Structures are given as structure tokens and as C-alpha cells.
Amino acid sequence: MKVVIQRVSSASVSVGDDYFKEIKHGLLILVGVEEADNQEDIEWLANKIVGLRIFDDENGVMNRSVIDVDGDIMLISQFTLHARTKKGNRPSYFDAAKSEIAIPIYNNFKTRLEELLNKVVPTGIFGEHMQVSLTNDGPVTIIIDSKNRI
């Protein structure tokens, strides 16, 4: 799994006129799933994310986690994180998992984040064209690939 984590003061996602979710202070997470991902990737990545000390303490030092600051998390599926761009100008998404594999992993990841955060994690709609807005706070943006944990 690959994630792009952005510390935000606000974020929202909409799909058409009927779907809108938003968060305030917290993390916007874009996640891409590949076929080799499994429960071990979910556990490691979810624990890593909620424990990341990327929020300021009283001295202005990034020393607090999203849990410490009672922040929110929004999760957005993003298969394009697995783009291959070495050849030509059209990215290949060969490494991105097909929806029948990606959706259960994505849903399990969401559930695990909710368990650790003890809050509902708003999401976009998997596979839909979405409008995502955010105010990156810092800016702080971190990229993590669960395959690079060792």
C-alpha cells in the first residue's frame, strides 16, 4: 500500500451533487492498493499513521500524533499512486490492484483506522470521480509505502 499523508486544517470530498464529506484539523490520506497487499500491510500502515508525530506541541515542535491532538482522518482511494512513468508520457497502472482485491483491503484499512482513532473516518466513493479539497497545514506531506518498512 502506498499513502500520501497530508496534515490539514480542513479537507473535503464530493461526488456529484449528492455526496459531501469533510473534516477539520487532522490528516487527509490518499491510499493506493496493490495486489500483494494484505492484513499485515493494513496493520503496519494504520499503526504508523496514527502514531506519526507530525502535529506541533506547545513549543511548536512536531511532537504530537493525530490521536494526541484529537484530529480527524479522511481516507481517499487513489489508484494513480501506483503509476509507472518510466516509458513514454502515458502512465501505466499495472501495479494497482483490481477493484475486487482493492475494495476489501481499502475497507479493512478504513475500519482499522477507525478502531485506532476511535472515530468515524470519512471517505470518498471508491472508483468514482471525486473532487477533493484541502488546506495543507504547514505544509506537511509524507509518503509511505508499506513495502519499504524493513
Image: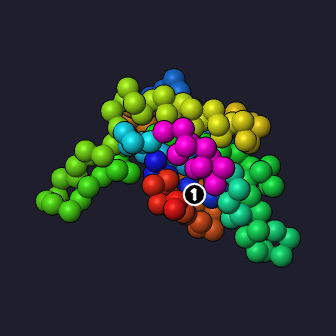
Does residue 134 belong to the magenta stretch? no
Examine the residues drawn in magenta and state their main secondary structure: helix
Residue in the picture at 86% in, 70% down: 58
- Determine the residue located farthest toward the front in the rendered image: 150
- Identified at 45% across, 29% down, the residue is 103
Q: Relative to residue 1, is residue 58 drawn left or right?
A: right
Residue 99 percent location from the top left of the image: 37, 29
Q: Secondary structure at mark 1?
A: strand
Q: Is residue 62 left or right of residue 13?
A: right
Q: Can residue 125 be seen from the camera position used here?
A: no
Q: Observer-nearest residue: 76 or 43?
A: 43
In this rendering, position of residue 8 left or right of residue 56:
left
Residue situated furthest top in the rendering: 18
Q: Quadrant of residue 94?
A: top left
Residue at horizontal 69 percent and vertical 36 percent from the top: 114
Query: Residue 146 at x, y = what percent?
Result: 49, 53
Is any part of residue 63 visible from this angle?
Answer: yes
Residue range of the region highlighted in magenta in the rendering: 38-49
| Residue 67, position as x, y percentages in the image | 77, 51
- The residue identified by callout 1 is 6
Residue for point 63% across, 32% down: 111
